[in-house]
Image: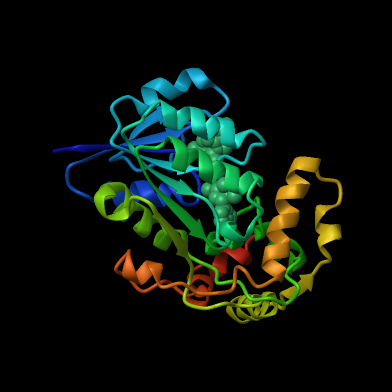
């Protein structure tokens, strides 16, 4: 029987990989939900549909008769309400939520935990994914790409603690298993990481070696990184950076192997694969 799966954030770093891998599975109808569904990035085997967290009138047709939803947590202050309302519209679906590593260490009423709780409370079946920082942040213009290209710096408040960076292709492999086999994966929280923790200094050294340019690691104070942000995003990022500093993103898990059936890709391999991207637009 054909399973119908809605993927939200279809053009995002995990969403596009989930779509690509779902499209290779037999008997799966993939709906690629995007606020801008006409871009070239979504897979031709998927059906592009309009899904916008800020336009509730796009939701009902997006979730109509779906068997499963890949739910990319929207970075919006009222994400808990939005996620709860969407999940209530598909009460029988398996919902696979993209949360983040060490969410369990955040306070019980935090934004992160409230979003997870809305899924647990409202979904017929659910799996919570808690990934570490994505390899692909390093090649994303909204994250680290431009400062590496232009300024040759990698800036983050890590306090010297390691991060078990993970590849979004490996997150997608775990997500696809959870989307297609809810009987096995319902009620599970999966911490998804790469093979080992890597410090900011070590990431900069890998980038330097791969590009032949000196990339400097700048370990900022948390207060500096939060300067000028709105109160809500300040709260969310303050918690994030404190957990990074406490080493909560550094512990590797075996979920890519045990659930995904694959060896997790290393950060070193990712950096080697993408080395030309940091040379474009450089001084
Ligand atoms: N980046 C990391 O290292 C990391 C680690 C752990 C957890 N996370 C979490 O993972 C999630 C994704 O993070 P990301 O920053 O890496 O983003 P991303 O996956 O690169 O992209 C976010 C996607 O959100 C979609 N989007 C934006 N506005 C939207 C709207 N109004 N309605 C519907 N979709 C909208 C966009 O897709 P369309 O253009 O297709 O609409 C965009 O591609 C966030 O919740 C983040 O906190 C990130």
Q: Quadrant of ligand 1?
A: top right
Above/below status of 104 relative to 19:
below
**What residue is at 51 percent from the left and 34 percent from the top?**
83
Question: Image quarter for residue 114?
Answer: top right
Answer yes or no: is residue 73 visible.
no
- Report whether 275 appears left or right of 22: right
Q: Position of residue 219 (x, y in %)?
A: 78, 71
Q: Position of residue 151 (x, y in %)?
A: 77, 65
- Report whether 189 appears left or right of 276: left
| Quarter of the rendering occupied by the C terminus | bottom right
Question: Image quarter for residue 80?
Answer: top right
Above/below status of 104 relative to 120:
below
- Report whether 279 appears left or right of 267: right
Q: Position of residue 104 (x, y in %)?
A: 57, 58
Above/below status of 274 relative to 30:
below
Above/below status of 145 relative to 115:
below
Answer yes or no: is residue 205 visible.
yes
**What residue is at 73 percent from the left and 77 percent from the top?**
160
Q: How is the image coloured?
A: rainbow
Q: Position of residue 269 (x, y in %)?
A: 47, 75
């Amino acid at each position: 029987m054909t399973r119908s799966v809605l993927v939200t954030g279809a053009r995002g770093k995990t969403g596009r990989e989930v779509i690509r891998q779902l499209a290779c599975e037999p008997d799966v109808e993939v709906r690629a939900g995007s606020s801008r569904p006409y871009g070239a990035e979504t897979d031709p085997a998927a059906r592009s549909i309009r899904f916008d967290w800020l336009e509730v009138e796009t939701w009902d047709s997006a979730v109509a008769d779906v068997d499963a939803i890949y739910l990319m947590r929207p970075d919006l202050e009222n994400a808990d309400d939005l996620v709860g309302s969407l999940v209530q519209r598909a009460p029988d679906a398996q919902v696979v939520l993209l949360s983040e590593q060490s969410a369990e260490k955040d306070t019980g009423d935090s934004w992160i935990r409230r979003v997870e709780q809305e899924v647990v409370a409202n979904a017929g079946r659910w799996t919570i994914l808690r990934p570490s920082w994505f390899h692909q942040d390093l090649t994303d213009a909204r994250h680290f790409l431009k400062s590496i290209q232009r300024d040759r710096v990698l800036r983050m408040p890590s306090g010297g603690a390691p991060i078990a960076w993970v590849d979004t292709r490996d997150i997608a492999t775990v997500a696809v298993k959870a989307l297609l086999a809810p009987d096995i994966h319902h009620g599970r929280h999966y911490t998804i990481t790469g093979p080992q923790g890597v410090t900011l200094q070590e990431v900069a050294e890998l980038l330097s070696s791969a590009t032949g340019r000196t990339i400097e690691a700048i370990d900022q104070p948390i207060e500096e990184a939060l300067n000028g942000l709105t109160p809500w995003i300040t709260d969310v990022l303050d918690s994030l950076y404190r957990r990074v500093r406490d080493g909560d993103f550094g512990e590797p898990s075996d979920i890519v192997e045990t659930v995904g059936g694959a060896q997790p890709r290393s950060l070193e391999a990712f950096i080697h694969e993408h080395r030309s991207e940091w040379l474009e637009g450089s001084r």
